[in-house]
Image (cartoon, rainbow, N blue to C red):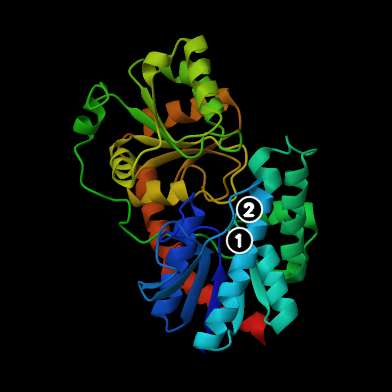
Amino acid sequence: MENLRIAMFSWESLYSVKVGGLAPHVSELAEALASRGDEVHIFTRNQDMPPYEIVNGVHYHRVNHSLEGGIVQQMDSMCDAMYAAFCYSMDQFGNFDIVHVHDWHPVNVVCRIKDDFGIPFIMTYHSTEWGRNGNIHAGWWEASEISHREWRGGYESSKVIVTSTVLRSEIQYLYQIPDYKMVIIPNGLYENKMRMEVDPGKIKSTHGIHPYAPVVLFVGRMNYQKGPDLLVQAIPGVLDNRWDARFVLIGEGEMRPVCERLAAELGVSGSCHFLGYVGETVKKEWVNACDIMCVPSRNEPFGIVLLEAWDAGKNIVATDAVALVDNFRNGVTVYKDPGSIAWGINHVLDNYAEGELGKAGRELLREKYNWDRIAGNTAAVYLDAKS
């Protein structure tokens, strides 16, 4: 297959500013493409790092920009800085074959590059403004502008990549992108990235949890989209079945105080441990020490946390907002309702104590969600858009 020079635009990466799950996707996809022989340049934000650096075979161009104003104004400044860096890189490295933009943040710069240089671009949606906020900010100017840029990216791109069937349906409902333009390519995970040898009892004991108590883990942003409040409301129903069950919630966000207050009102604070933001090592320890990973999302474009749980061989309970789970084969699917979530957790605790569901998920991870396969499928989309 023809090797390409690729310009990839993202507001985050593993080796610049890291915000969430987009960062590993961008960096690990770029590394997998580079290992195929493609020349990949990532244009991203800077955070006290060199403006240019090669990391794991990938060229990083990090830009500084104004932090004044709201998120839209900041992204306008970032796009201007990225455009200047792109023009300079063409002088240094030559013309690019394809441009790949991730989410709405750099959409303005790739549209400008398309107009000025005629280089086609691919748009990958990882989520939408509507999905992130449940449309609760529909009258907010910034939300409307972000949605407009999401639409513009899909409209002006040559191809659109989405990470799941659920996200494809959401994108088509919101922005009327035709079928012929859309390709589903999932997120990925390097095998054994999350898997590590731990003493589960020792990890639990660090927070006063009995070594043999079953632990249900939540990892994610504490916001409306991810549904941590639904999990907290499910806790009484789980404790009725297993009084010794404990719940560990990792993540920060505007709903953390809401969930803490809700736990107190329900009388289950003693069974909850809100850890807030933790480092990668602590997160990995809990993923490997827990008994169940719960994904109570109201909206879930993909769900990288499922791949991480499967890598560790863990059972999963997830709402039907998640498209990855094959019900009762590699996880249990429940409704976006506290009673249903409680039922699912109880069902797994009573029937899958040895992690059978997680073992099946680990096999699927190896077969479908490996980066080499994902990079090959992405390169095929590049060539199709370029032809």
Residue at disc 2, secondary structure: helix
What is the crowding at mark 2: few (fewer than 14 residues within 10 Å), some, or many (at least 20)?
some
Instruction: Judge from the rendering whether residue 176 lies leftward or rightward of residue 319; answer left or right.
Output: right
The residue sitting at 61% across, 42% down in the picture is 321
Instruction: Give the residue type that dot 2 points to.
Output: Gln
Q: Quadrant of residue 108?
A: bottom right
Q: Is residue 167 above or below residue 52?
A: above
Q: Quadrant of residue 251?
A: top left
Instruction: Give the residue type that dot 1 points to.
Output: Met
Identify which residue, 118 or 21, lies in the foreground: 118
x then y, percent, for residue 170: 71, 51
The residue sitting at 55% across, 87% down in the picture is 91
Q: Is residue 124 visible?
A: no
Quadrant location of the C terminus in the rendered image: bottom right
x then y, percent, for residue 369: 45, 62
Instruction: Judge from the rendering whether residue 339 lies leftward or rightward of residue 217; answer left or right.
Output: right
Q: Mark 1 highlights which residue? A: 78
Instruction: Judge from the rendering whether residue 125 lies leftward or rightward of residue 368; answer left or right.
Output: right
Residue 74's tag is 2
Q: Are marks 1 and 2 in contact (CB under 8 Å)?
A: yes
Identify which residue, 54 or 294, lies in the foreground: 54
x then y, percent, for residue 295: 50, 38
Q: Is residue 117 above or below residue 298?
A: below
Instruction: Judge from the rendering whether residue 146 lies leftward or rightward of residue 255; answer left or right.
Output: right
